[in-house]
Image: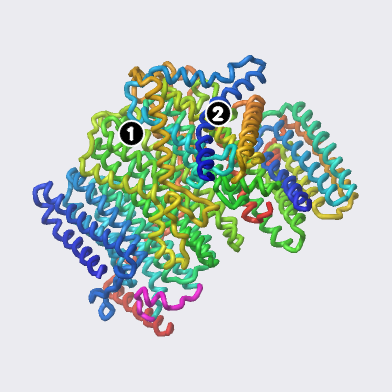
Amino acid sequence: MQHFSLDAAHMFAGGMVLVSFMMLYQDRILGLINVFAAHAVVLTLSVSWQAYIQDAPHLYITAAIAFGLKAIGIPWALHRMVVRLGIHREIETVGGIGPTMLMGIVLVALSMVVMLPAAAEADPIAREDLALALSVILLGLLMMVTRQNAVSQIIGFMSLENGLILAATGAKGMPLVVEISVAFSVLVAFIVIGVFLFRIRERFDTVDTQALDDFREGRE
Amino acid sequence: MGLILDLLVQGTQMVLVLVLAPGLIGFTRKIKAHLLRRQGPPVLQPYYDLLRLVRKEAVLAHNASWLFRNAPYMIFATTWVAAALVPTFAANLHFSWAADLIAITALLGSSRFFLALVGMDIGTSFGGIGSSREMLFATLAEPAMIMIIFTVALVAGSTQLSEVATFMVTHTSLRVSLGLALIGLIIVALAENARIPVDNPATHLELTMVHEAMILEYSGRHLAVIELAAALKLLLYISMIACIFVPWGIAQPDDGILYLLLGAVTYLAKIAIGGFLMVVFETSIAKMRVFRAPEFLGGALMLGFLGTLLLFVSRSF
Amino acid sequence: MAIAVALWCVIGLIAVSAAAPALAARPQPLGTRLVYGASLILTGLLLLIGIAALLGGADFQGQKVLPIGLPWIGAHFSLDSLSAVFLIIVNLGGVAASLYALGYGLHEEAPGRVLPFYPAFLAGMNLVLLSADAFSFLVSWEFMSLSSWALVMSHHHEGENRKAGYVYLLMASFGTLMLMLAFGLLAGTSGDATFAAIMTAAHPDWISGAVLVLMLLGAGSKAGLVPLHVWLPLAHPAAPSHVSGLMSGVMTKVAVYGFIRVVFVLLGQPQWWWAVLLLVLGSLTAVLGVLQAVMQRDLKRLLAYSTVENIGIIFIGIGLALAFKTNGMGAAASLAIVSALLHCFNHSLFKNLLFLGAGNVLVGTGERDIEKLGGLIHRMPRTAYLFLGGCVAISALPPLNGFVSEWLLLQAILLSPDLPQWALRFLVPAAGAMLALAAALAGSCFVRAFGVTFLGRARSTAASEAHEAEPVSLKAMSLLIGLCLLAGTLPGPLIDSLSPVTSFLVAGHMPTQPLMPLLSIIPINESRSSYSGILVFGFIMASSWIAIRVIHNFASRAVRRAPPWDCGFPNADPATQYTADSFAQPIRRVFGPMFFRLKVDAHMPRPGDPKPATLAVTLRDLVWDFLYAPISGWVMFAAERLNVLQFLTIRSYLSLVFAALVALLFLVATWA
């Protein structure tokens, strides 16, 4: 049983990494939102599993928040927003998908190298989960860096946050309070950025952040 | 007695894959037609087609070379040998030590090599376009396959498919790396068998076809042999996925006749389910642009590489 | 004993070389036949000696000191199992090339420029393998370089060949300089430069490291390791085809020999970062080489780039062997080194074969540009058959030999998770992925090479009027393809015969390859992996025979000839065929942006505008841009500055010489 629970925890964490890669690969914005929802679903499963094997019922609440908010609420809102903005077209990545994926693999390797020897004394389930969580975080960052579109940057940010939750639940005894506050802060950030988006839309007719930069450079 | 049984199993396997392959094609076509609310041709239609083709005379272009006439048999033979070495209903194939997973991949590579060559033999533009694209997909699918093999081999400690199947039955466990390898293998299988989203087996629209463009000039018995080889290849990939990732039910070494029968029944169920899932996937998505396909296959390569990398880091992934 | 015969053979080759100018003046066929016939016999003898020394063990090995070279030291020569392996590779290539040239050489326009240097080139390569001290090694090396340079320059009327010769001379001098420094560091101040003395001396870590880097620069530049490969695709195709085959198939292996001799034998215990360096360079070489090969239009240059790829594969094998050796994993190291050595052997076979095939095409049509060929399978069926065999072998497809060595290499990679170093653990799977990518790209490269050259319809009158080559040339090629098949189906005895070399190099050996079941090869143990070439070959033959029998007996055998169908739009113009460039376009588009900074500038005029559409494709060679261009810039800059030195008085020149002498003496005084 111990063996199986370890395997399953790995499986879910590995699934998160896989879905992160799928987000990097996805170059249409509606597809990206759907993949993000899948990311949150895998996170939910992972957190519930952790709640089950650690016997920590408060983690179920975390799972419920992840599911309700990130798998359903935010994707639904983003979906509407994207359609209303009329940007459900292709989004461009900086430097092509192939190199981005290669970068992603390098980042995963890097997080393995950093985590596995550093936490050599920790028990394997937490150690390898932590390494995978760090990969998810780095892939989220990579996503934010390589995309020009504001919506996909937000999604990158939220996937990064999913990685943080994965790391936090993997380690035993993370207080729930922190978790809720993190979730709400993300929500707040989301709303702020959402409002911000509509402003951009009014002024520039685009949500491409490159346009913002061009505008600023033009003024200087 | 053991040796005779082993040889019998190997012989049965060789005949079995040959007999089942067109049936699988017919089955998937039928299911696909049903999903599209059509009646569809009978399941046995591919057999009728093959019989019809071998009876007809072969029409060769004026400038067809000796390679063009001989290559179909080469393509068929390499594919058949490869298919005969993938365990289907019994894990202990007598000749499984002759070629491991890498060799099976390379055998399929040989078959593709000749297929791409004959695409260029007549000197038509469609043949060339097919060969060129087939080789492009191969340049990504083959390394992806090798990486997937690495992942499986590192988990199972062997590249022999029989050993892998036995290992997988006895050491059931959930592995991240195997999950990655499974998804990668499915992508490779779709691309190698010219299925949607990479290629469309049903199309004859010139610029969207890859596999069909290469065999455009074939007719009669040559075409029949190539079609049979293509069907064998599809069966091979589904059997391979079944034997690595869902090996349950497969007869183990030293099992009796009863277990062999049980293995055969579960094998039939597995390929039926595999074919069904493939058709459901195919009907639910659209074909990709040609230059989107390399990214798709690059994804498979990346998954295989990631799986291997994880295993190199820690054996418990 | 054997070593003496070998040296006599080499002396014989040099004598033939000396007599060649006189023979070349004879009426054409005779002189050519005499020179190549003599080379054939002498290389054949050397081949036998090599085989005897490898299989016969100590009885046929030995050492010899000749009183030539440096006074009081003499020239040391020796024959051991390692040099025996490469003696076989070199002289097998020599035999095939000489046999081929008995026919091909008759078409040579300027035999006087080829005949004298050809035996000398063979002699030079053999001497490198036999030398056992630094001085004779370097002299032989330089002899080999210069004689091959003369052969590259044999068609010096074409400007491109002159440029190739210049670049080759530059890189060869650079390589020899690096080797000289490496041996200088190895021999130290003791002055005893025999290999035996170097081997027993202790080398500090930094010296070993420096020697490794210098060997990579020196031997690597001769072998064609990226980024030192630039001369290779220029020089190899410029020589006559049988010499191209020797340079690509054999001379690069001599460079690999030099590297293995120094790094595995003379340097002693390796350090793990050497393996990192080799794996990185090897994988880069493999992928860059084959990517360039896919895009070439010149058949011989395509083959030369493919040599670069194969050298990369060999160096991946050597790197793995070093990694395993560092960690004391003898069995794994022997597997890796066997795969590298076997690939050396295999590559020498099929690369020779392919270059000879290219030579037939060149003689038959006068064209090297594959865009102007096509349909040669009808005019040159036997060449086409043999070339096809070479293509299958080099694309690593079973049941031929290229597959066997790459399969062994992949098996060696599968053993590497046991390595303790983190860097290696991450690097080895990446090298494996690059290796697999290179192998797959090689497949598409040779589908393109064969398909465009031999299949389809003739794209020029030269191609439509091609003629088949001489029977003796085809015999040489048949010999090579036969060996390819033999090595592919029965690799077991080959692997067994390499075991003295592996125990000598990495102090380990692979398991003895069993005769039963049916000569399969087993890298580690039977449950882990095995492969039986002969059985796979037999199965393929049997099943295609069954298929042909069944269909011809029970179904139609009728054949009707008709115009091609081509979806209903057949066009008789050969220009409508897929070209070599269009075949490579998808690969260029996928890999170009990353490896060559591909830029495609397509300009379509508006509808109604009669201007032609334009398409401009630019590919940058990044190695050239980032390494060679800056270096040549600095050299030009320095030359510009030093120009003043050309206009000094004699007195100032003398004072410069004097100052240099005093400075050196001062250095010597302070060093000791």
Q: Indicate left or right for B166 with C396 as reference.
A: right
Chain designation of label 1: C
Which of discs 1 and 2 lies nearer the camera? The answer is 2
Q: Secondary structure at mark 1?
A: helix
Which residue is drawn at the image coordinates 46% and 28% (left, top)? Answer: B130
Q: Is residue B93 above or below residue C347?
A: above
Q: Which residue is mark 2?
A: B20
Indicate the position of residue A4 as horizontal and vertical percent values. Answer: 75, 49
Residue B105 - label: none
Task: Say if B304 sits above or below C117 in the image.
Answer: above
Task: Say which element carries label 2.
Answer: helix
Amino acid type assigned to the residue bearing label 1 in the image: Phe
Mark 1 vs 2: CB contact within 8 A: no
Image side of residue B162 versus residue C493, left or right: right
Q: Position of residue C20 (x, y in %)?
A: 15, 56
The span picked out in magenta is C190-205
- Queried whether the magenta region covers residue C603, the answer comes back as no
Q: In the rendered view, does A107 fall on the left or right side of C641?
A: right
Relative side of C388 to B101, left or right: left
Residue where numbered disc 1 is placed: C454
